[in-house]
Amino acid sequence: MKAVILAAGIASRLRPLTDTTPKCLLKVGERCLLQRAFDALLQNGFREFVIVTGYRQQQIVNFLEAHYPALEVTFIYNEKYASTNNIYSLWLTRPYVDKEDILLLDSDILFDPQIVAKLLGYGQADALALNHHTLGEEEIKVIADNDGKVLEISKTCSISRAIGESIGIEKMSAAYTEALFRELEVMITKEGLDNIFYERAFERLIPQGHSFYALDTTEYFSVELDTVNDFEQAQRLIPSINGLIFMADYDIRPLQLRILKILLAVDKVCKEHGLRYYIMAGTMLGAVRHKGFIPWDDDLDIGMPRADYDLLMSHSKEWLPKPYEAVCAENDPNYPLPFAKIQDADTTLIERMHLKYLGGIYLDVFPLDGVPQSNLKQRIHFARYEFYKRVLYFIYRDPYKHGKGPGSWLPLLCRRLFTTAGVQRSIRNVMTTYDFDKSSLVCDYDDGMRGIMPKAELGAPTPVSFEGETVWGVQDYDAYLTRKYGDYMVIPKQSGQRQHNFHYLDLDKPYSSQESSNSIL
């Protein structure tokens, strides 16, 4: 299914906000409307996009090419944007979407991505999202029968009979788009009706037997932004609704692209020095399912056989180009994790308020080690690993995260009984008990016993496309991803779409410019 986004209008009611910027590029919070729409669509599995531009069209093209370089986006320029309405923009999409399933949406809607998910999962092939609220003259109102089948849709239909407002997102089958464009051809080329809303075409199709079913999406947030006041209200709303429907509100795409540069630098170093690595976990999943980043993901993961991992860590200062640097237990006595990170030293990041390790945005590098064959030995082996890993966590956790009561006692005790260096040595000794190259079963240890896999599954590092770049991934990716995620091609519900929600993030300031994590809290 293709997503069709209409973004040609001047939006004169939003002046002066739109004097120099198209409406869809106006920010609400940290992301503009168009980015929020694209992120919501990507989150729901869309990979093909058709967008109609007009007013200040080059800004829109430049923005999408910069933020989503690997996506398949068809740009259509409506040269009559100043004298036509959205019906004409829709008409221009005919060569690209006629007789195809599409999701149509206007670019001026702030909406919960779950609305798209609900539409896609709805049993009716042709459906529109509907919001129940007190109606006025300006809304596109919907009158429907008892089954929810739309009988009328317009601004002018009876308020008393209307069941709600169409929010401007419609799912259409191939049969519907075929009928729609046939009707639009009459309206545009013969009747000259190019300066009206496209809902008029929907109305004309109803007597012909083509109608939508109204799907109630009132439970999810949505609002059309038409005026300066609308934007001001949305800006105030974003902080309260962000955690519920938009997850972290920092601009995730620039973050993803900066992290991608780290991966490409590591890829180059590994290939120059004959080191093995694999993109793994969510990164491997993203490569297969999304051809790049999972839309809501804000990190990258690679795994390296222990021998290659150690070589990279020991030579990182001479091999890695600036501003990239490796941080790990072997080169930083204060490092709080049992695996390494390659970080961008020109940025600043604190992941969690109670884990105040100061660094930059990063690529996770997991050493790959062997594991024993027998289930009993595996349980004993991983119990030792999990014990030391937990101790390491408590050493670094703020003891007073939960106040000064009993919750503080265990972190304080661990600090008295153990040293960071000693715990890190113990973790390494456990992980390296079984040599990667001599073992048939291996593990990245991050998932504990659940991460155990046949080494043959990894195979030789295999070229895979990620964000339009060629990197190395798991050879038998289907077996790997199935074991790790089950039916991995299914997009999870929003509750399963995890972001870090970093406590502090600055892509423009080196972390070394800060005296400590406390200076930026």
Image (tube, rainbow, N blue to C red):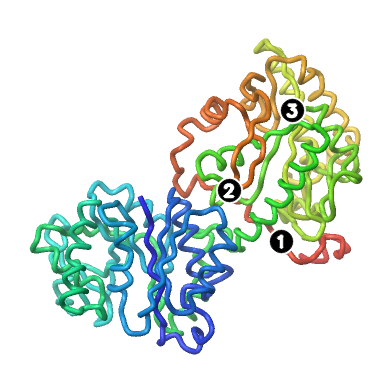
Residue farthest bottom in this picture: 16
Q: Earlier in the sequence, mark 3 or mark 1?
A: 3
Mark nearer the viewer, 3 or 1: 3
Q: CA distance from mark 3 to mark 1?
A: 30 Å
Q: Earlier in the sequence, mark 1 or mark 2?
A: 2
Mark nearer the viewer, 3 or 2: 2
Element on which disc 2 rests: loop
Q: Quick one: label 3, few (<14), some, or many (20+) residues within 10 Å?
A: many
- The front one of 413 and 125 is 125
Q: Amino acid at mark 2?
A: Phe
Q: Earlier in the sequence, mark 3 or mark 2?
A: 2
Q: CA distance from mark 3 to mark 2?
A: 23 Å
Q: Residue at x 81, y 23 (%)?
A: 432
Element on which disc 3 rests: strand
Residue 450: x %, y % from top left: 61, 26
Residue 299: x %, y % from top left: 66, 48
Q: Residue at x 42, y 57 (%)?
A: 49
Q: Which mark is residue 504?
A: 1
Residue farthest left in this picture: 207
State whether residue 300 is above or below residue 506: above
State whether residue 411 is above or below residue 165: above
Image label count: 3
- The front one of 293 and 381 is 293
Q: Which mark is residue 368?
A: 3
Residue 347: x %, y % from top left: 77, 60
Q: Amino acid at mark 1?
A: Tyr
Query: Badge 2 is on which residue?
Result: 293
Q: Quadrant of residue 65?
A: bottom right
